[in-house]
Structure formats: structure tokens, C-alpha cells
Amino acid sequence: MDAAARERYRKRLAELKSEILSGGDIEIEPARQDPTAITVDDDAQPLVEMSQAIASSRNRNRAQVLGRVVAALGRLTDPDDAFGLCIECEEPIPAKRLDLMPYVELCVECQQTKDGPKGPTSRRHLQDFK
């Protein structure tokens, strides 16, 4: 990988890092909206719990991506030239994949192996389209 490409990826990773850090965590709304209320609104409770689960999941995903971005920045500065190589098979990761996700650690084949085969979908026998 040439110096210009490395610099382009470094800039992109630095932008991603600052974007994630500046965005902060997604606020998880409390279960009780009115602090003076004695009881919780049973009708609103499922929606509040779902919103809390979504916000928590997004925060966890953002933290994982941030960790991968920081690791990729470390690989970029590594003198062993490990950036752009799959950490499993050590083959070069295609530039198209790195352009989309500069923090990626695995090539497509190794990622598919790690993810495992896709299971059958539950929508196989649906007839609602008729």
C-alpha cells in the first residue's frame, strides 16, 4: 500500500473517530417520565423498554466500532505494515472493502467463515403475498 493511500485511510479513520466521540452516547430515556407520578403508565411501558433496548444496543455498537477504529489507527502506524491485511489469513483486504470500512480486520472469506452459514429463514412458507 502506498503512502497516499495510507494517509487517505488515516484521515478517514480520524474522521470516524472524531464523529463517534463528538456524537456521544445516545441517551436512554427513563422509565418514568413524570417524577411526581406514583405509578408507571402500563400502556407506555413496552415502548419505553423498547426505546431503552435500542439506545443501549446502539451505544454498544458505537463503542465496538470506536474500538475497531482505534485498533486500525494503531495498525496504520505499525511498522510491520499490518494495515490492509486480514488478521486471519494475512491476505490483502480489497481496497473497495477498506474504502467502505477502513477499520475492517478480516477479508470477505474469513468474515464469512467467522459469521458461519446463514440459517433458514422463518419466512420460507409464507403465503401472504398472494
Image (cartoon, helix red, strand yellow):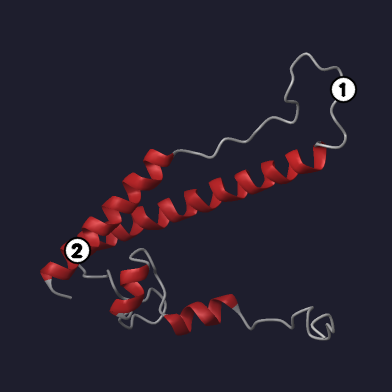
User: Viewer-proximal residue, 71 or 52?
Assistant: 52
Q: What residue lies at 53% left-to-right and 53% top-to-bottom?
A: 61
Task: Give the residue pinned by disc 2.
Answer: 8
Figure check: 127 above or below 24:
below
Figure check: 48 above or below 63:
above
Q: Can residue 102 be seen in this view?
A: yes
Figure check: 2 above or below 16:
below
Mark linked to residue 120: none
Q: Where is residue 53 in the image (x, y as percent from the top left)?
A: 68, 46
Q: What element carries label 2?
A: helix
Residue 45 left/right relative to 66: right
Q: Earlier in the sequence, mark 1 or mark 2?
A: 2
Q: What element carries label 1?
A: loop
Q: What residue type is labelled 1?
A: Thr
Q: Is residue 79 visible?
A: no
Task: Give the residue pinned by disc 1.
Answer: 39
Figure check: 48 above or below 68:
above
Q: What residue lies at 74% left-to-right and 38% top-to-bottom?
A: 48
